[in-house]
């Protein structure tokens, strides 16, 4: 009878009752997740951040623990060094930035600034082709619009304070989670491994190892490429200074460009912004900078085009030479998959989602590969 | 009254060797290890329990590493249990098996079945790789000892082959 039922199902391709139950359970699980997601998304985000930080810091903590023989002290030492580094960077950046701002405001009065913007706007408009010029609104005074924009920004400072408070809370929680994960990582991992049933044990342990390897190789790749972008950007900015670009805070701009480079596709363009702002702030009022031309042909007021070109060259060198040579294809995803992942990540979690979209997809790929392997060898387990 | 706080602070002082370390000390792959090395190795071991008749692994299944018997017995067989089962070896406490899987991606060449309730220590390729990264000296020692064990087994197989050939010639 059973055989008859089976052949009947096979003939008509009918799903068995178990498959229907499985499908129903999946639908209920997805529905439940979609309901609770708004409440847990922040916590999930914090845990993902903490896990990534743990992956980065784990080898240092392990190495120190082997030397001094105490896990808690090793975690403490690594965290203090990290916080000290971040604090020193931010502190020195903020102090230098405020110095720069003070100098800028003492040098410039409102009329000059408006005039400079107007000249810059006119220059850009005149450089545009005719049909684009016609599209400009006749009363489009760039300087007025800019001052309106500045007013709006100042007005929204209060809401920014709230956002900063929220960020501080998330950062503190991530910090606490990271410390706990660093201290207990091997214990957590062992508990997870112990929970795998005997039948799937060897496959499970391989899966966990492959996920760890995939995430850490991705992170290592990202940090190497960020460091190379930072170093090349600093070198490029110093080179531009030789040609009279008068750029300051080069080290900070380079580091920010390197960090921004961690976000694929969008990051490299975000990295250019501080350099462009500094070039503008430092060169405002200077006739030579205003009349500067790139290669003596293309008008490039305040060295703006030079900076953009320099960053584009840096990105090409990083993307086509350094990253493939140093880390290879760390996650091994097709570019189209990367773009789709970025779009989905960006839609769900914004810029942070974009940052994690690629490693998360890499992990998903590892999991799916292992599941396919288990299904293929299921009769042997 | 004993204070839990003081007990925790002095936890680990005068600690006697654990059962895991005592089992590991019987395995030739870990010979000449220091106490510190044994304690590091102990942290990496996976404890697995199997009921009587449970498969530890099946012939042709993908293999990831070796097992050391802590309690119980394991038989290594080829063929199915239905009738043509051929027992290659019966192993007891301190014996180890499956070590070839540490080196290659080949599937298992035999079944391993627990004959009574058994506790095993698992040590896998991934653990060996992690050890190579975290403590290369210890990883090197294990690889060297494993090479010695495999060489010894190869020599034994060669002797058996020579004996069979000699018998054939006679």
Image (cartoon, coloured by chain):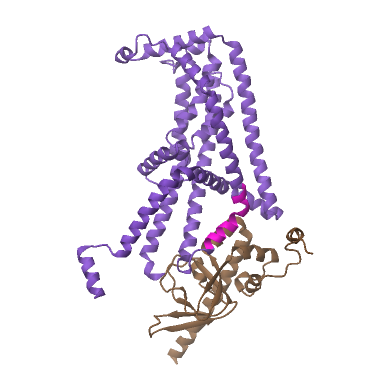
Give the x, y percent position of residue A303: 48, 18
Residue at 39 percent across and 80 percent down: it is B80
Give the x, y percent position of residue A287: 51, 9
- Highlighted magenta segment, given as a residue range: A179-193
Give the x, y percent position of residue A8: 21, 68
- Asked if residue A97 can be seen in this view, the reply is yes
Please name whichever residue, A178 or A236, is drawn nearer the observer in this view of the structure.
A178
Residue at 44 percent across and 71 percent down: it is B108
Q: Is residue A269 magenta?
A: no
- Asked if residue A120 can be seen in this view, the reply is no
In the image, residue A28 above or below residue B99: above
Relative placement, left or right, of B3 versus B98 is right
Q: Colour of chain A?
A: purple
Relative placement, left or right, of B58 versus A188 is left
Relative placement, left or right, of A190 versus A145 is right
Chain with colour brown in the figure:
B
Which quadrant, please, contains the C terminus of chain B? Answer: bottom left
Give the x, y percent position of residue B62: 43, 67
Predominant SS along the magenta part? helix
Which quadrant, please, contains the N terminus of chain B? Answer: bottom right
Counting labels gives 0
Please name whichever residue, A50 or A335, is drawn nearer the observer in this view of the structure.
A50
Q: Is residue A180 magenta?
A: yes
């Amino acid at each position: 009878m059973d055989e008859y039922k089976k052949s009947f199902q096979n003939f008509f391709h009918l799903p068995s009752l178990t498959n229907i139950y499985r499908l129903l359970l999946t639908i209920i699980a997805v529905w439940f997740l979609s309901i609770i997601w708004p409440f847990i998304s922040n916590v999930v985000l914090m845990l993902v951040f903490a896990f990534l930080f743990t992956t980065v810091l784990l080898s240092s903590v392990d190495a120190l623990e082997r030397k001094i023989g105490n896990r808690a002290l090793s975690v403490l030492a690594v965290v203090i060094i990290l916080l000290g580094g971040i604090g020193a960077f931010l502190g020195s950046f903020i102090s230098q930035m405020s110095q720069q701002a003070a100098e800028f405001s003492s040098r410039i009065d409102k009329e000059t600034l408006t005039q400079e913007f107007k000249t810059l706007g006119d220059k850009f408009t005149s450089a545009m082709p005719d049909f684009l010029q016609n599209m400009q609104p006749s009363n489009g005074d760039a300087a007025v619009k800019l001052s309106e924009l500045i007013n709006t920004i100042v007005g929204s400072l209060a809401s920014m304070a709230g956002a900063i408070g929220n960020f501080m809370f998330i950062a503190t929680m991530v910090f606490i989670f990271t410390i706990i994960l660093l201290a207990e990582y091997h214990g957590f991992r062992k508990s997870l491994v112990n929970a795998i049933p005997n039948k799937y044990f060897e496959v499970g342990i391989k899966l966990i190892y492959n996920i760890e390897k995939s995430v850490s190789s991705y992170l290592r790749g990202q940090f190497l490429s960020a460091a190379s972008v930072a170093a090349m950007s600093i070198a490029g900015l110093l080179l531009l200074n030789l040609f009279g670009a008068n750029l300051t805070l080069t080290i900070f701009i380079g580091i920010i460009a390197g960090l921004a480079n961690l976000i694929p596709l969008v990051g490299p363009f975000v990295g250019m912004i501080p350099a462009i702002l500094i070039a503008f702030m430092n060169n405002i009022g200077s006739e030579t900078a205003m009349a500067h031309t790139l290669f003596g042909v293309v008008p490039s007021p305040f060295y703006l085009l030079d900076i953009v070109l320099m960053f584009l060259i840096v990105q090409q060198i990083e993307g086509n030479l350094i990253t493939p040579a140093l880390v290879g294809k760390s996650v091994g995803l097709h570019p189209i998959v990367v773009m789709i992942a970025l779009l989905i990540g960006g839609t769900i979690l914004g810029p942070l989602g974009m940052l994690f979209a690629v490693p998360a997809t890499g992990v998903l790929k590892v999991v799916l590969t292992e599941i396919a392997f288990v299904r293929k060898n299921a009769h042997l387990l | 009254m004993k204070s839990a706080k003081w007990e925790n602070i002095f936890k680990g002082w005068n600690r006697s060797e654990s059962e895991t370390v005592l089992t590991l000390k019987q395995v030739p792959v870990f010979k000449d290890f220091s106490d510190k090395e044994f304690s590091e190795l102990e942290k990496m071991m996976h404890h697995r329990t199997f009921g009587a008749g449970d498969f530890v692994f099946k012939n042709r299944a993908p293999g990831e590493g070796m097992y050391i018997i802590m309690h119980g017995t394991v038989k290594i067989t080829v063929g199915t249990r239905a009738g043509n089962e051929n027992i290659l070896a019966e192993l007891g406490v301190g014996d180890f098996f499956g070590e070839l899987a540490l080196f290659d991606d080949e599937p298992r060449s035999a079944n391993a079945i627990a004959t009574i309730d058994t506790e095993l220590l698992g040590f896998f390729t991934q653990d060996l790789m992690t050890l190579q990264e975290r403590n290369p000296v210890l990883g090197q020692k294990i690889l060297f000892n494993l090479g010695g064990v495999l060489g010894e087994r190869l020599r034994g197989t060669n002797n058996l082959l020579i004996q069979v050939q000699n018998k054939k010639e006679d």
